[in-house]
Image: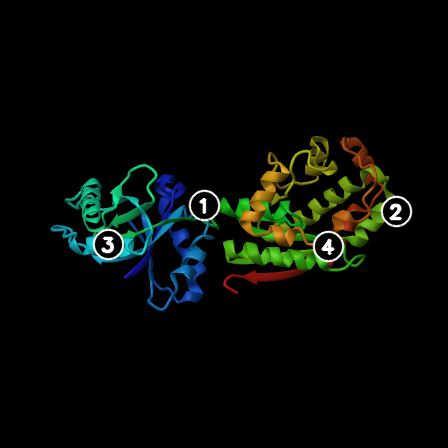
């Protein structure tokens, strides 16, 4: 029988709530694998066992598990029956021998985990027995530190599983265990990474994009749709709100001093996004701000922008530099899409010398001369909603 044995880390520390987190992870695994016709996903003794039918590629399963938040690592295994009272390791030894014959190595070690403590053989007993057998039949050397190959053995109540490599998952928490957040998605490098970091902490992300349409093309909208489809692979269902913001920006340009435009844009974006977040039952807003990266992200300007929000405004990237963010975008797979040229609203009507130390009193005075509520209503009335699913 072919299986995937899934391990998790943080979930095991949840005390009385552990069952809730485990069951949500099992549910998410079923969602990730549903189009592969995999029926058996079971929580067993501190790990999750997924039974893989013969006609399903293990590579396809591995690709889904690599993107399931809450999965620390997993093994793609072959299993053999195990008698709890009188365990006979001969079949396990033979399976291990066939498995290592496919690998190129000179040194190895065996790492066993015993899930059921009623098994009379300890983990170390199994490691010595299997390791000695493989030394004899292969002529290879045991090396406990940094071996060429590690053979993993999982001992459950009625079966043993053996695998030749451990594959890392994203870790974190299962999506859906930390509520909903509204992520402002610009189409650049930073905001998809910020959204992913919140998804990895168990949040379900609702996406809000502010487009320069109708004053510019819809290129930024197409980029954002690609990015949302990518992120949907981690949370299985997504909603994207696209807010046409070009006309609002044009009205601000006509009625507000140039140095304060960018801060005003962002305060109105926050207000519009907050209304959409309330509709969706979100508990916070999320942005891709990184302290000091651009003029709008100085400490003073961030503070003034946040003042416009009533919901908590989260900034997962606040202490990261551009190199760190870019590396995460490349790992996520969003970088190539993010750097495609577009005409987004962030580049519309940007002053040559924006204010970097905006004072709340100055912004309040300017906003009293603007129809802020009208801008918010205009944005909400023209918002377009798209939905995404994975597997599509």
Outermost residue, right direction?
A: 254
On the picture, is 57 further left or further right than 80?
right
On the picture, is 190 further left or further right than 35?
right
Label 2 neighbourhood size at 10 Å, few (<14), some (14-19), many (20+)? Answer: few
Q: Position of residue 383 (x, y in %)?
A: 70, 58
Q: Position of residue 377 (x, y in %)?
A: 75, 53
Q: Are marks 4 and 3 in contact (CB under 8 Å)?
A: no
On the picture, is 261 further left or further right than 313?
right
- Tell me the residue that label 3 is attached to: 97
**Quarter of the view holding residue 317:** top right
Q: CA distance from mark 4 to mark 2?
A: 24 Å
Label 1 neighbourhood size at 10 Å, few (<14), some (14-19), many (20+)? Answer: many
Label 3 neighbourhood size at 10 Å, few (<14), some (14-19), many (20+)? Answer: some
Precedes in sequence: disc 1 or disc 3: 3
Residue 363's label in the rendered image is: none
Precedes in sequence: disc 1 or disc 4: 1
For the residues carrying marks 2 and 3, which lies nearer the camera in this image? Answer: 3
- Tell me the residue that label 2 is attached to: 254
Q: Position of residue 278 (x, y in %)?
A: 62, 49
**Colour treatment of the image:** rainbow
Secondary structure found at label 1:
loop
Q: CA distance from mark 2 to mark 3?
A: 76 Å
Q: Residue at x 20, y 47 (%)?
A: 130
- Tell me the residue that label 1 is attached to: 173
For the residues carrying marks 4 and 3, which lies nearer the camera in this image? Answer: 3
Q: CA distance from mark 1 to mark 4?
A: 34 Å
- Tell me the residue that label 4 is attached to: 342
Q: Residue at x 50, y 63 (%)?
A: 391
Q: CA distance from mark 4 to mark 3?
A: 55 Å
For the residues carrying marks 4 and 2, which lies nearer the camera in this image? Answer: 4
Secondary structure found at label 4:
loop
């Amino acid at each position: 029988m072919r299986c995937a044995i899934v391990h998790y880390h943080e979930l095991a520390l949840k005390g009385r709530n552990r069952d809730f987190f485990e069951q949500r992870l099992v549910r998410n695994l079923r969602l990730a694998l549903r189009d592969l016709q995999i029926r058996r996903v079971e929580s067993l003794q501190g790990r999750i066992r997924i039974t893989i039918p013969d006609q399903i590629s293990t590579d396809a399963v591995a690709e889904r598990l690599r993107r399931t938040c809450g999965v620390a690592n997993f093994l793609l295994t072959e299993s053999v029956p195990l008698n709890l009272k009188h365990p006979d390791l001969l079949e396990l030894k033979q399976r291990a021998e066939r498995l290592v014959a496919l690998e190129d190595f000179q040194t190895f070690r065996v790492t066993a985990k015993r899930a059921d403590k009623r098994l009379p053989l300890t983990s170390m007993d199994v490691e010595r027995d299997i390791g000695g057998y493989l030394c004899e039949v292969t002529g290879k050397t045991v090396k406990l530190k940094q071996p060429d190959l590690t053979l993993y053995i999982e001992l459950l109540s009625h079966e043993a599983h053996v695998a030749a490599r451990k594959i890392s998952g994203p870790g974190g928490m299962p999506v859906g265990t930390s509520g909903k957040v509204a992520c402002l998605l610009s189409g650049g490098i930073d905001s998809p990474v910020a959204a992913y970091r919140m998804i990895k902490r168990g949040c379900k992300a609702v996406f809000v994009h502010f487009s320069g349409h109708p004053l510019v093309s819809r290129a930024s909208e197409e980029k954002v749709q690609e990015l949302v489809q990518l992120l949907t692979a981690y949370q299985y269902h997504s909603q994207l709100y696209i807010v046409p913001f070009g006309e609002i920006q044009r009205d601000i340009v006509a009625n507000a001093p140039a140095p304060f435009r960018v801060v005003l844009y962002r305060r109105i974006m926050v207000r519009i996004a907050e209304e959409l977040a309330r509709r969706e039952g979100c508990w916070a807003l999320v942005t891709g701000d990184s302290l000091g990266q651009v003029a709008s992200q100085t400490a003073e300007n961030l503070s003034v922008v946040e003042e416009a929000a009533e919901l908590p405004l989260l900034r997962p990237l606040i202490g990261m530099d551009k190199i760190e963010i870019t590396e995460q975008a490349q790992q996520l797979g969003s970088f190539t899409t993010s750097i495609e040229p577009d005409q987004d609203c962030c580049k519309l009507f940007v002053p040559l010398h924006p204010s970097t130390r905006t004072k709340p009193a100055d912004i309040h005075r300017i906003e009293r001369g603007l129809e802020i509520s009208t801008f918010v209503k205009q944005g909400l009335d023209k918002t377009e909603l798209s939905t995404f699913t994975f597997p599509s």
